[in-house]
Image (tube, rainbow, N blue to C red):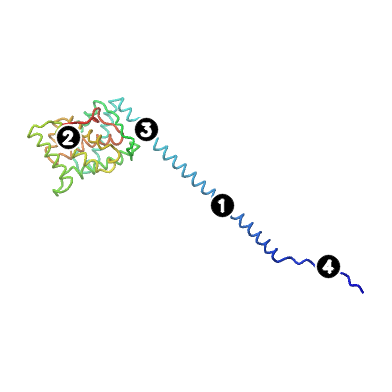
Amino acid sequence: MKWPKIKMPKIPNPVDAIVDVGNDIADGVNDAVDTVTDGVNDAVDTVVDGVNDAVDTVVDGVTDGYNATKEFAESLVNDTAKAVAHTTQVCVSQSTEYSKQGFDVTSDAWKQGTDATIAAVSQGVEIIEYAATEAYEWLDANACYLGLNLALTTGCVAYFTPKPSAADPGTVNSTAISSVYLSYIATQGTNLAMSVAIAKIITEGILLIPGVKGNVDDTMLYNVICNSIATCNPYVLSVSLATPAGVGIFIGSVISPIVAQLVCEQIAPKGFKEAVNA
């Protein structure tokens, strides 16, 4: 008897099955990785775009502020009446801050100092070009005045007004300035020699004030301060510099407004950038 052939079913190779499962898993993982990668890339692109937009906005704002300040400074150069009005406004705003520091800004000495400052500008102003290497913190004049007015008034009190301690910087500087002035009067020395000596002391103190150092060329600051003293009304000098207490009045009413404009708008009274030699 011949038995019929029985066809045995093909049994799947377990290895092939494992490979297939592995491939399916790998495909799933790759799809998941691709999805995550795409998501990460999209997120990174969004962040980068946001940063670039923010940087562009800041740069545009800084550029606009700088350009606006430059245009305003140029308008002051071309219009002396406008320059005088602006300086008067700066004197008023600074006087308000100095009054908070205890100065009597209604005194005759203070008013005479303010008049001397305005008189210096009445002959016109000029733009001070700085070296390209200078890095300026203030590229917007309004922001500059908001920060610098307080800094200058606080610095004036710290470095140019006498204190109970003989070793205090304010006592040392105000006494030194007054002594130089009295010596000049006693020996009838030249006004230029007196201006040079006093300007060195004042410049060193002003440069310690935050917002000034790095925002103005040191030599140019010295020149402007020196010329401010040399051209100032002699009566104003005699009222202010004869005593250490009066030195702060002179710095606050005469020097401070001129320095503020030098830093914030890069302008100075015409001729004040020139070096003064005793």
What number is the disc on residue 196? Answer: 2
Query: Looking at the image, is mark 2 or mark 3 earlier in the sequence?
Result: 3
What number is the disc on residue 257? Answer: none
Pick whichever, 138 or 92, lies toward us. 138
Does residue 106 appear in the picture of this structure? Answer: no
Residue 267, percent from left and from top: 28, 31
Query: Looking at the image, is mark 4 or mark 1 earlier in the sequence?
Result: 4
Q: Nearer the viewer, mark 4 or mark 3?
A: 4
Residue visible at 83% across and 67% down in the picture: 7
What number is the disc on residue 37? Answer: 1
Question: What amino acid is found at the position of numbered circle 2 in the picture?
Answer: Val
Q: Gap in Å between the C-alphas at discs 3 and 1?
A: 45 Å
Q: Quadrant of the C terminus?
A: top left
Q: Gap in Å between the C-alphas at discs 4 and 3?
A: 95 Å
Dot 2, how many residues are within 10 Å of its Cα: few (below 14), some (14-19), or many (20+)? many
Q: Are marks 4 and 1 in contact (CB under 8 Å)?
A: no
Q: Quadrant of the N terminus?
A: bottom right
Residue 273, percent from left and from top: 25, 31
Does residue 170 appear in the picture of this structure? Answer: yes
Q: Gap in Å between the C-alphas at discs 2 and 3?
A: 35 Å
Question: What amino acid is found at the position of numbered circle 4 in the picture?
Answer: Lys
Q: Are marks 2 and 4 in contact (CB under 8 Å)?
A: no
Query: Looking at the image, is mark 2 or mark 4 earlier in the sequence?
Result: 4
Question: Which structural element holds mark 2?
Answer: helix
What number is the disc on residue 68? Answer: 3
What number is the disc on residue 7? Answer: 4
